[in-house]
Image: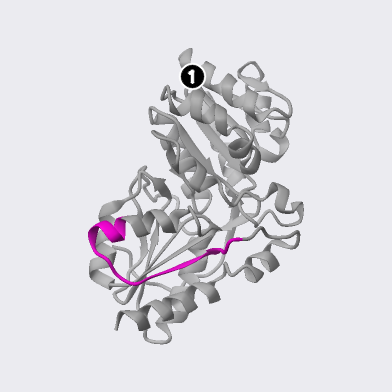
Amino acid sequence: MAAKTKFEIKLGAATREAFGRVLVELGHENKDIVVCDADLSKSTMTVYFAKEFPERFVSLGIAEANMTAVGAGLALAGKIPFVSSFSAFAMNKGFEQLRVCAAYPFVNLKVVGTHSGISIGEDGPSQMSIEEIGLACSLPGFVVIAPADEVATRALVRAAAAHVGPVFIRTGRPKAPTVYSADQKFEIGKAIEVAAGRDVTIIANGLLVAQALLAADVLDGEGISARVVDMHTAKPIDRETIARAAAETRAIVVAEEHLVDGGLGVRVAQVVAETRPCPMEFVGIQNTYAESGQPDELMEKYGLVARDVAAAARRVVARKG
C-alpha cells in the first residue's frame, strides 16, 4: 500500500512520446514487431520506428480503416502489429474494421491512439477523442489501457506487446506529470493504489491521476483522507480493487478525461453495483464536445482539474453519512 505524501507536478515526456520510444526498443528485441501508421508518424511518434526499421513500417496514408484491416492481416500472418493514429481517427474511422477484422476473429492487433481527450488543445473538437474508451470497451476481447505517465506507458506498451489478443492504448499529446518512479511494476488488469486513504477513494486514469493526487493533498488539509487508485486498465477492470475501495472507504469518485457517459466511471459503477454499493461521483466531460483552446484552460473550463475532483470528493463524503 502506498504511503501518502504531498504530490508535486513534475512534467515528464508525453505518453505518445514514451510510446514511440519504447516501440523502437521492442523492435530491436522482437523482429515480429511491425508498425502501420496513417500519415501521422511525426505526431504519433512512430517516426522513430520508421527510421530504425523502414522495412517493418508501412504508411497507409490518410486511411485509418484500411490501416486497421492491414494490421489485422499482419496479425493473422503471425506478426505483432502496432497500428497508430490520433485516437479520434483510429477508433471512429476504423471502428468497423476493429469490430470485424480484430475483435470478432480475436487477432493479435495492438491499436495505439494518440492526441486523446481535450488536452490536445488548439486542434479543436473534430480531433478531440472523448468517446474512445467506451467504444473500445464495447469490443469483445479487447484490452483497453489509459496510462498516466511516461513510466506507465513504457511498461504497459511492453505488456500489450506480450499479451496475446487485441489491445487499445490511449495516449496524449501534452507532457504528462510524472506519477511513478522508474521501478514501478505494472500488470494489465491490475490497478495501482498511488495514495492511501480511508474516507473516500478517487479512481482515475490518464492525466486525471495527477489531478487526483493534487486533490488528495487539498482534502488532507481539510481532514478528509483520500485514497487514489490508478485504474490504468479500463478492460479487464480490476474488480477486486474497486470492491475493496467501496467496502473500506464507502465513497468513490471516478475522474477521467472522457465523456462520463460510457467511460471508466460507468465501468466502475457497474462493479460497485454488483459488489458493494456506495455513494459515487463522476468527474469527466458532461454530455458536450469541447472547443479549441489552450490545454490547461480547457481542462479547467470542462471541470477536469484537482479543484473539481476535490469538490466531488467532498460531496460524496457528505452523502455517505
Q: Secondary structure at mark 1?
A: helix
Q: Residue at x 37, y 86 (%)?
A: 223
Residue at image coords 28%, 65%: 245
Q: Residue at x 42, y 56 (%)?
A: 266
Residue 157, compared with residue 38, is above or below; it is below
Circle 1 sits on which residue?
75
Residue range highlighted in magenta? 271-287
Q: Quadrant of the C terminus?
A: bottom left
Number of disc labels: 1
Which quadrant of the structure image shows residue 65? top right
Measuring from the top left, give residue 39's x and y in whole percent: 73, 30
Q: Measured from the top left, where is residue 220 in percent x and y?
A: 40, 81
Residue 261 placement, left or right of 52: left
User: Is any atom of residue 155 visible in this view?
Assistant: no
Q: Residue furthest bottom?
A: 222
Left or right: residue 309 versus residue 321 is right
Q: Quadrant of the N terminus?
A: bottom left
- Residue type, numbered disc 1: Ala
